[in-house]
Amino acid sequence: MADRLEFHEKLKGILELAARQNSRITTEEVERYFKEEQLSQEQIELVYDYLMSQKIIVKGYEKENSLKTGDKELKMNADEEAYLKEYLNDLKALKQAKPGEKDMLFGRLASGDTSVKARLTEVYLEEVVEIAKELYHPEIFFADLVQEGNVNLMLALEGLTEFDNPEKAVLCEIRQGIRSLIEEQTEVKKRGRKMVEKVSALDEAITKLTDELGHKVTFEELMVYMDMSEQEIKDIMRLAGEEAEEG
């Protein structure tokens, strides 16, 4: 228990560190922070996934075989298809990037000319769409993926300091932002499903015990039947919007 509490405190600490860095952290910082724990690679990747579920961008982390549609055909719903068609049509109104323009713009940005950020944002909007399609997840509305990608595009350009391969850095941050949204949203839905399952299990247990015992079920009887503590049962009842009465 002490070890678990200590690790929990460590997680809180790394979240606070990332928050101070505009919700961004590098894999090197994470590994350095948990160095004393001597985590395995699998464990450290679980830490990365946890951070992403909290909308933290983990720079340098590429989750292998994760959240990709690969060569499979995208199966968007009608609203998503309509959004994509209209959005791509809107992008056609923007001036297409000329050969060498990106390098020129990044060069000016490296020299301190921040006025080029608006143009760089324009030339990467289609890249955002392609990454959103690559990482498409049926539980997340496609427009939300694009919007998240666009936000992270602007944040990447705002915080860009390394210009050896600026395009790679920008695309990586867009991808990380979309991944983080998916991790966060699917985790929220997962918790929601678990909550529903717990409420249903409690309801079934109360109904069954009431039928079998012929009287109002007590907490003690539920605790034995469900192998839960009284507090756990009360918490589930609160999730269901019920008052936890002593019985």
Image (cartoon, rainbow, N blue to C red):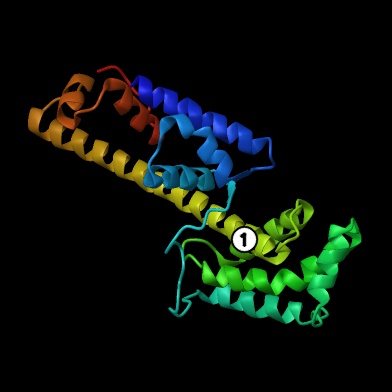
In the displayed structure, does residue 103 sit left or right of residue 172?
Answer: right
Between 186 and 238, the residue placed more toward the observer is 186
Q: Choose top left, top right, bottom left or bottom right for residue 208.
A: top left
Seen at 77% across and 73% down, the residue is 123
Q: Quadrant of residue 18?
A: top right
Q: Position of residue 194 (x, y in %)?
A: 35, 44
Answer above or below: position of 201 versus 118: above
Give 198 or 146, whichever is nearer the viewer: 146
Residue 22, position in %: x, y? Answer: 69, 42
Number of labels in the image equals 1
Q: Is residue 123 above or below residue 44?
A: below
Q: Secondary structure at mark 1?
A: helix
Residue 151 horizontal/vertical position (percent): 70, 57
List the residue tagged with mark 1: 172
Q: Residue at x 52, y 43 (%)?
A: 51
> Looking at the image, which residue is at 80% across and 71% down?
103
Asked if residue 216 can be seen in this view, the reply is no
The residue drawn where x is 19% and y is 36% is 205
Q: Residue furthest left?
A: 212
- Left or right relative to 121: residue 72: left
Residue 186 in the image: above or below residue 94: above
Between residues 240 and 50, which one lies in front from this camera angle?
Answer: 50
Q: Specify few, some or many for label 1: CA neighbours under 10 Å numbering under 14, 14-19, or 20 or more.
A: many
